[in-house]
Image (cartoon, rainbow, N blue to C red):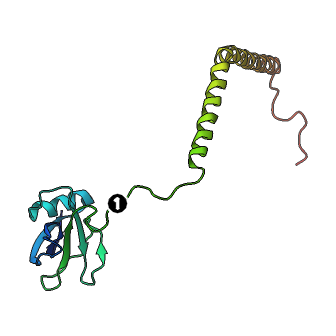
Amino acid sequence: MAGPKIWLVIYRFDQEIEGKTGAAKGPFSVDIPGESSAVEVQNTIRKQLKIKDKKLVLKLRNHRKSLIPINSHIVQNTKFQPYTLEVVKRFQNVKPQARSAPISGYTEMIKQRLENLLRRIEKLEDIVPEMKQNREKKMQKEMEGIDENLKFIRQRIEESESHKWQGMFTKHPLW
């Protein structure tokens, strides 16, 4: 099933030279496959626009400059009001930093959880030899309960076999 045909103006921020942004290129038309995943749509856009680097981030904006998701449900637009596709590097505008805020009590909490897990494992290791015996005791109790139920059912069946059917009513109704 064919999807919408969208028009894009491309800004290649990944090819900036000393803070100067490149000029807009386009508009280009791209055929979006219908009922496909977001990854497939992104790969289609990359292929049709010859963007080979998979590490680049694609940002799609509408005519109001709002970000819109890249998926198969993109609304078809015109050549005179194209979407803006910004191609940027990961962490191009913001440099990631290592976690700088100290988390109070984090290491203590992790140590407590580790000790708790170790205690639980030790308890399980102590119980393992007894588990087989406990299982056998439980099975024996269940078998005894089933045996009692069978005796009761057998007794009821024998009682019901000794009775004979003598008709529906022993005394005629008064109608």
The reply to whether residue 8 is in sight is: no
Mark 1 closeness class: few <14, some 14–19, many ≥20 residues within 10 Å: few
- Name the residue located 62 percent from the left edge and 20 percent from the top edge: 125
Q: In this view, does 173 lie to the left or right of 15?
A: right
- Name the residue located 24 percent from the left edge and 69 percent from the top edge: 59
The reply to whether residue 82 is in sight is: yes
The location of residue 155, given as percent across then percent down, is 81, 17
Q: In this view, does 9 lie to the left or right of 143?
A: left
Work out whether residue 44 or residue 148 is closer to the camera in this orientation and state it.
44
**Amino acid type, residue under disc 1 in the picture:** Pro
Disc 1 designates what residue? 96
The location of residue 148, given as percent across then percent down, is 79, 18
SS label for mark 1: loop
The location of residue 162, given as percent across then percent down, is 82, 17
Answer with the quarter of the image where residue 54 lies.
bottom left
Q: Is residue 119 left or right of residue 24?
A: right
Q: Is residue 167 left or right of residue 14?
A: right
Q: In which quarter of the image is the N terminus?
A: bottom left
Can you say whether 46 is above or below 65 in the image?
above
- Name the residue located 49 percent from the left edge and 59 percent from the top edge: 101
The location of residue 134, given as percent across then percent down, is 71, 17
Can you say whether 85 is above or below 152 in the image?
below
Work out whether residue 11 or residue 172 is closer to the camera in this orientation and state it.
11
Work out whether residue 112 or residue 138 is closer to the camera in this orientation and state it.
112
